[in-house]
Image: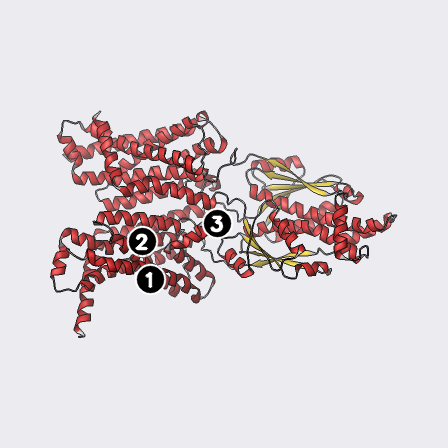
Amino acid sequence: MKAVWIALTNLRRMFRRRANIFFVFVFPMLLILVLGATFGSAATPRVGVVVARAGQLSDALARQLAHTAGLRIVRVGSVADLMTMVERGSLAAGVEIPAGYDSAIRGGGTAVLRYIARPGTSAQQVGETVRSAAARQAELLGAARFAVARHASASFSAALAKAKAISSAVPRVSVTERTAGTARFGRSLGQFDEGAWTELLLFMFLTAMTGAVALIEIRRLGVPRRMLATPTPPGTVVAGETLGRLLVGLIQALVIIVGSALLFGVHWGDPLGVAAIVLLFGLVAAGFGIFVGTLFRNEQQAMGLSLLLGLGLAALGGCMVPLEVFSPTLKKVAHITPHAWANDAFAKLIGHGATIGAILPQLEVLAAYAAVLLILATWRLRRILVASL
Amino acid sequence: MTERPRGLMRAAVLIAGKDLKARVRDRSALIIGIVVPLALAFIFNGIFSGISGGSKAISLGVVVADHGAAGQSFIASVLAPLRHAGLIAVHTEPTAASARTLVESGSLSAAITVPAGFTEALRAGKPAALGVIESAAAPLTAQIARSIAAAYASDLNRARLSVAAVAAGSPGISRASIARLAAQAAAAAPPLTVRDVSASTKELDNKSFFAAGMAVFFLFFTVQFGVTSLLEERADGTMARLLAAPIPRASILGGKLLTSFALGIVSMLVLVIATSLLFGASWGNPVGVVVLIAAATLSAMGIMALIATFAKNAEQAGNWQAVVAVILGLLGGTFFPVSQAPGILSSLTFAAPQAWFLRGLGDLRAGSLSVIWTPVLALLAFAVVTGGLAMARLNRIAEV
């Protein structure tokens, strides 16, 4: 019972500082929001289009581009703006439909579209989709021009109208697609889903790490010494401190999970599975935070190391870029971190709609981490407490 | 009269010197200003450079079951130029089934099949279809394979429609004439072509982005040591003694500002040199970099000083400064490029000085030195507005 009181006192001390409320609850939510807004729907490349002079044909091409799968078209006012946006990376590429587009094609000439991209293979690859849209647009235009050249039609407009009329009767050469393999996620993720679970892990761990600093602070203030002066065995103090860290992590997780579900519509999947990951990961984080806290005497140094470990391990564990894009070697290295296992579990739960049964292997690894770290942490903390007497 | 300004300066330098010595001794500035940002930039760079990004050639399988000319012409006239451009690597597979297995296992990114009888169907004007086998795990690559096949199909359709458009106007046209028209239509130049224009890049590469992002993020913490120490002096009671000494109040403030400025500039310069040497970050024209760093340091000092004037004590100041520094860091794109986000966020980011600093570095990459004036002026505007407000309020702190 005493351990619970010690834990609750820990909680009160933590949240009395209003800046902590910001870092524990508000900042993670902000980050989920900004991440989702920036990358949540970034799978389709954004391509800017400038129509230098409006015209029937120019507008038709712009519409064709807008309806092409695999491109998200953004209309841009001028070529200079388009160039700058491409250079700065806010657009993947740009297409300029020149001022003489309509007249060149109507006159039987060739119109040249400019595809503006930064050097690099991926932007060139997007260019293939732009080319396919141009080729599609050229089907009728080319037929009309051919008819005019062969004197089958009096004017380009008449020829174009005729080509349109007969096009449905002409058998087409088409492309049929078949899909092989399995998608990264079985169900399509919401804009904020992946950001939410990765940030949850990052911040639970980071908060526990800053708990290391709090541990040094209470030692400096002599809190444990005074607790031990009362008839309280060291084991109770150790249990209380650990429980306090765990509680902070669990409350944080609850707020982030419920908050992101309500505010950003994040779908968290099987509640039992989520609860199991959060509880085990919370134990891992608490154990690690306390263990690190026992290794330092200086708050500044512990703060620096906490930030480093909190952010560094999260990055390595796939909380900043998904593990799927890691190279095979780096992926193996990543699984040194508990984050990677928890990320795998969340990917299964949220990305594939799995239930707790499917993530048992990941939960076992997290449980093993938790056991080892908590044993180490309590052993170290007990030694330090007793030594401080 | 000349004695006074010199004395003013001397006192300020002495106070700054004392503060700097204390910061060096307790290592706090070293840790926050240099060690942590350097280590984080190093870790992020290590992880992100190990990622197999989308900048490689696509390994595209091709299955030609057709015995006619169309399949070979597809390889020679469509795929070969793309291979030369380094966009794709072409692997010929014997059957669609074998290609499918390879796509499933991830050995091929996608495959295009030209079915048996394709050339014959083209000649007879019958419906025909190219096949694309795409990987569910790589939707972007699938899109590109689909586009390559679709562009070729469109070229064939253009020829078909061309023939039909002419033939529709002349009923009873002979088979021989149609065959001749088909050959002419297939050879006709397309009415629109796409020409590649290479844009210069004003984006920082990964290495430089992480180096610059972490450096400017922690700059907002490093400058706190000088400004906030006014509050510490007050709490420790040393402020009263400073004020009792024959030192003008301006010298005390000047000393604290000098401390912040020196800590900011030195830590940034150390980071520039260290990241350049250790992992090859390229910051750009040194003069431009130094000007941007100076302007960014002033803006950070202004904002952090303003927050400090609202705080009761150093601890509270530190808390609120950390909150603001973290929000501005996130918004300013020090962790990931928020300016590339769609929508309102891409403008909102410029409410943070960090965004101007990073934009300045990005522009510097592609342009001459003159391009940094806009970001530098924006940074100085932050410094003047927030710093001015802080100065107006600072006298409140510099009391007992």
N-term mark: 3 or 2: 2
Label 1 marks a residue whose chain is B
Compared with B334, B129 (above or below) is: above
Q: CA distance from mark 3 to mark 2?
A: 27 Å
Of circles 3 and 2, the one toward us is: 3
Q: Is residue A154 left or right of residue A38?
A: right
User: What percent of the width, then of the height, locates residue A347?
Assistant: 46, 34
Disc 1 marks a residue whose amino acid type is: Ala
- Give the residue at x 28% y 34%: A245
Say if labels 3 and 1 share a chain.
yes
Q: CA distance from mark 2 to mark 1?
A: 13 Å
Say if labels 3 and 2 share a chain.
yes
The residue to which callout 3 is attached is B343
The residue to which callout 2 is attached is B220
User: What percent of the width, then of the height, locates residue B226?
Assistant: 24, 56
Disc 2 marks a residue whose amino acid type is: Phe
Name the quarter where the C terminus of chain B is drawn.
bottom left
Q: Is residue B269 visible?
A: no
